[in-house]
Image (spheres, rainbow, N blue to C red):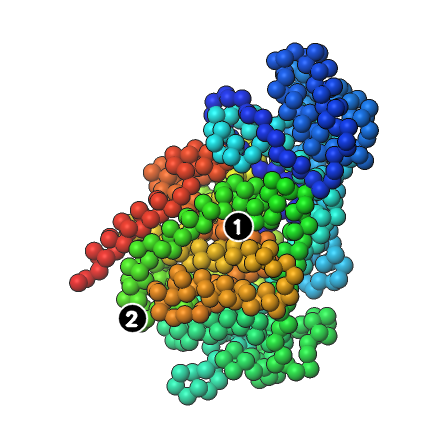
Amino acid sequence: MLARGILVGLFCGLGMLAAQEKPMTTVVAGPPSAGIAPAWITAAQHKLETELVAKYGEGQGERIRRGLTQVAEFWRSEDGEQAALESFVLANFAGDQAALDTVFSRFEKLLERAEGHLYEIGREFRTQADLDLGPMLPLDETFAGFDPGAHVIDDMFRNKLAFVVLLNFPLTTLEQRLNEGRHWTRRQWAEARLAQRFSKRVPAEVNQAIAQAQAEGDHYISEYNIWMYHVVGESTADKSQLRLFPKNMRLLSHWNLRDEIKADYDVPQNGLARQRTVQQVMERIVMQTIPQAAINNPQLDWNPWTNQVKPAAEKDSDFVPSAAKAATLPKDLNVREPDTRYAILQKTYFAACKMDPYSPTAPTHIARRFDENREIPEERVRKMLVDVITSPLVPQIAALIEKRLARPLEPFDIWYSGFRPKSQYSEAQLDDIVRQRYPTAEAYRSDIPNLLVKLGFAPERARYVAENIIVDPARGSGHALGTGMRDAKVHLRTRIEKSGMNYKGFNIAVHEMGHNVEQTFSMKDVDHWLLSGVPNTAFTEALAFVFQARDLELLGLHSPSPADEAMRTLNDFWGTYEIAGVALVDMAAWHWMYDHPNATPAELREAVIQIAKQTWNQYYAPVFKKRDVVLLGVYSHMIDYFLYLPDYPIGHLIAFQIEEQMKKAGKIGPEFERMASFGSVAPDLWMMHATGKPVGPESLLAATERALKEVNSAVPK
């Protein structure tokens, strides 16, 4: 999981590409802030246009008119009277190429330093919240919610630096970037990205409110552990209470709970009972019937079937809930969590909505996530997801899974992991192998060069990347934290227990390492800092998936055969099928919140439950033969990640296209570097450079059909 940017309001630009020289068309975007332009602004525009054209010639006329229009759209009375505007424009319009080059290079250099150092400050402020360094104090939560960059854009409008950019560089629409962008040069793309950073005039207090909502959500999710030894189940034989899970197993919702379901396919005794129990836990979390006292508390036993909580009959951990948590526990241990999950979700919605009045071209958070952050329209994303989950391949693969399991599908089989290459090692044995190899974060960091060489990177490039990665023990499941400047290092965070890293932690670490490698190449090796990064989060998720899929190979426990590759394709498809439904629930939940802005957390809870059920009933019940399942609503990303989940299925589709290209090339390392160093370009342009095809599900669907035929032909009749 890639961490969201620390500084939500800071430099909201993306990145782009070009091939051939072609002028960019002028765009008039409409009023870009909630303020009102002065009455004299139009007359001032005409006067300035006449003066500037007379000075620089009609050859600069289009640039002059565009720049004046953009400045006028953002200028407010508090920025100065007409004389101040005229003086500013005459002093700051770059009337020839040499002057424009100077303005461009100055902004690129100085914005890199500003963004880079603000990222470092934000990372330091979040240290106690992000890392497993002991209990958090109230002040730690305040530091985590503080956005040191919240005032930057606001200040740059006040001191007129933003207006220098708007006067000289073009604002563009999504349609332009998608349709005309293939003809732009890299410099033109960089100019467009520079202007995008100032396409909204958002007050600092809005950015700070968003950062605070993110921090509160992060803290809630990072502490949402279930101590599984104290989750008592029911045996199918005598209904007596049964401890199904080992001591000291602390699972974070949802990541570790989901991964436990996957791991339990390899547990011969009680594996199925474990999976059913974890599903029951998940459903309690989604429906908020989980007892509040049972969350992150090994001092109590909880039966999720009867929903009864009692003092723990056995002790397995010295962990004691914080004094703050203990003080909030109800006297009745069976009282449910009071809709906190949905109150947190609603807070993210309220915070995101504060930006709506300042974003007329993308007037909702939904529009901003798809049109600006992803640069893939929502309807196109929806169609890609539905194309996967309604594919005729789904029931065929479901039938194959049933045959392999020798039982009918159950809802938790949406996380079926049996197509993954198997080693001769159990989950417990894998835990032991990983703990011995990586007892500390430093042990993993030291081994990064070796891991990258195994992935096909040249030794010197592996060392180059490893030198730029710092590994930290995460409080939550883990994340990758990039940087804003080329001479800073990226951070890899993964959960490391006192006994060392376990297999789940290693799997996450490998995923986050993929993010870190991308972050290194796309920052340090891209030609323009303004084009650093990748088109959107789905692309860095895709590149991270490439690493994560090879975790067993990196441990030296598996070497894939052609049959394994076919099985991996089925695994990729089934994983995309699962997460596509989760993304649809996330999307629908945000639409519901916008349609019901005055709802209570309880009403939001019921709405999300119904959305999860409806999505399941429409797309999954025909396959699983069970209706009204709520599992699609369990992902923690939905609560604190501001409509993040669609990035995962898009990332799976992109990952598969990337994998296909890497197979053709023969090595992961050089292709990974070639792709990542192309920078933050429009999605289809990046993908055309990487693979020769635009983003879409076609490659995955075609390969899955071939893989299914191969696997079925190998099964004895």
Numbered badge on residue 406: 2
Identity, as a three-letter code, of the amino acid under mark 1: Glu
Q: Report the residue at 64% width, 35% height from top.
A: 30
Pointer 2 local density, CA inside 10 Å: few below 14, some 14–19, many at least 20 = few
- Give coordinates of residue 330: x percent, y percent: 68, 79
Question: What is the C-alpha distance between the residues marked 1 and 2?
Answer: 35 Å
Which of the 4 image quarters holds residue 579? bottom left
Q: Is residue 350 above or below residue 66?
A: below
Whether residue 448 is visible to the viewer of this picture, yes or no, is no
Write down the residue under mark 1: 512
- Give coordinates of residue 661: x percent, y percent: 37, 39
- Secondary structure of the residue carrying tag 2 is loop
Identity, as a three-letter code, of the amino acid under mark 2: Ala
Position of 145 with respect to 607 (left or right) is: right
Position of 706 with respect to 127 (left or right) is: left
Position of 710 with respect to 386 (left or right) is: left
Quadrant of the rendering where the C terminus is positioned? bottom left
- Secondary structure of the residue carrying tag 1 is helix
